[in-house]
Image: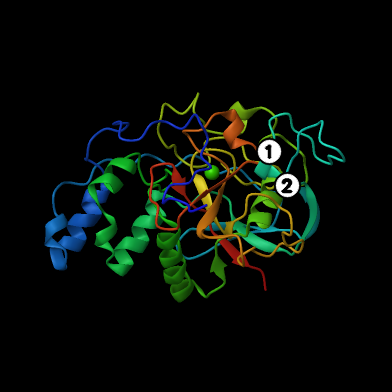
Amino acid sequence: MPLSVFSPHRPPNHSPHGQPRHQPLANAWLGVGKVLCTSLFLGLCVGMAALLPSTPAQAQSALKTTTNSLGMKLVRIPAGSFTMGACKPDTPNCTQPDPDAQGDDGPPHRVTVKAFWLADTEVTQGQFKQFIMATGRADLITEDFIKNNNVGDHAAITGVSWNDAQDFLAWLNKTQGGGYRLPTEAEWEYACRAGGQHRHCGSDDVESVAWHLNNSGSRVHGVASKRPNAWGLHDMSGNVWEWVQDVWYDSYYGAPTDGSAWTSGGYQIHRVLRGGSWSDSALGVRSAYRNNYAPVVRDDFIGFRLARTAQ
Ligand SMILES: [Ca+2]
């Protein structure tokens, strides 16, 4: 069955598109555009920079961390094995029951993951701004982009396609020594669960760990303003959906069990996203929940998180 640009697998409770959710224009992106326009992109010089909110304190991780020269903090995720996915409790031989499990959440299966690095937060507006400034990508600063990213530097970046994320990673690898990439889907869920079996990443209590439909005020939030999981990772559930490397399959039958990305076969025109967002119900920000979009899709609930291969 052919797939449209927008995913057929979309939670039913997403906020409707086309509705104004944000205050208009004035934000720091206009400042970025203004600087870029001063030299090369005159058409984008349409406003003034605005306030940047203060940065909340970061929670401490029990694991080793590193911070690159751009201030991006990554946690060393230990090697290990876990059960990936979920199934309805009445499913025969169900090894990881969840009453809200969806058909494409399973079947649960054991996966062994190598050690890797993962950012403790989603990529922020401030970090993405550095990329735009360094590369001159003023083409990314559209009117929608400005509307979708008006919370401030410490908020998660939104409106970023899978392809945009690859451009960001290419820039990072060029300037920060290499090895940066998106997490694989298995790595993402392994890090979300952090050795536990919580309904959401880090807790069965969604309010403590996630910005979601019923507490977000219909907007993205500053990263790390909710409690982290056991490995010091914030907002794995909620705030923004996070792109991973893998192409979309509607089940885990035949999935790799070594933590690698599943990139052959399947729905090659769609990439997987995990974690749910500010516009999803508690069901959509579950540890096992999955989604997918074409790699060109930009929307105000889509962002990403950095991974880096461990040496
Ligand atoms: Ca998230």
Q: Residue at x 71, y 52 (%)?
A: 252
Residue 257, given in percent of the width and then of the height, sits at 77, 61
Residue 258 is left or right of residue 15, and the answer is right
Distance, label 1 to label 2, CA atoms, is: 7 Å
Q: Residue at x 48, y 34 (%)?
A: 278
- Identify the residue under disc 1: 202
Q: Quadrant of ligand 1?
A: top right
- Identify the residue under disc 2: 194
Q: Nearer the viewer, residue 226 or 187?
A: 187
Residue 27, given in percent of the width and then of the height, sits at 25, 43
**Ligand 1 within 8 Å of the CB at mark 1:** no
Q: Nearer the viewer, residue 23 or 143?
A: 143
Residue 309, given in percent of the width and then of the height, sits at 63, 68
Amino acid on which the number 2 mark rests in the picture: Ala
Quick one: label 1 or label 2, which is nearer the N terminus? 2
Image quarter (top left, top right, bottom left or bottom right) of the C terminus:
bottom right
Q: Residue at x 54, y 40 (%)?
A: 276
Residue 244 is left or right of residue 135, and the answer is right
Secondary structure state at the residue bearing disc 2 = loop
Report the residue that reaches farthest toward the top: 214
Amino acid on which the number 1 mark rests in the picture: Gly
Q: Nearer the viewer, residue 278 or 88?
A: 88
Report the residue that reaches farthest toward the front: 1
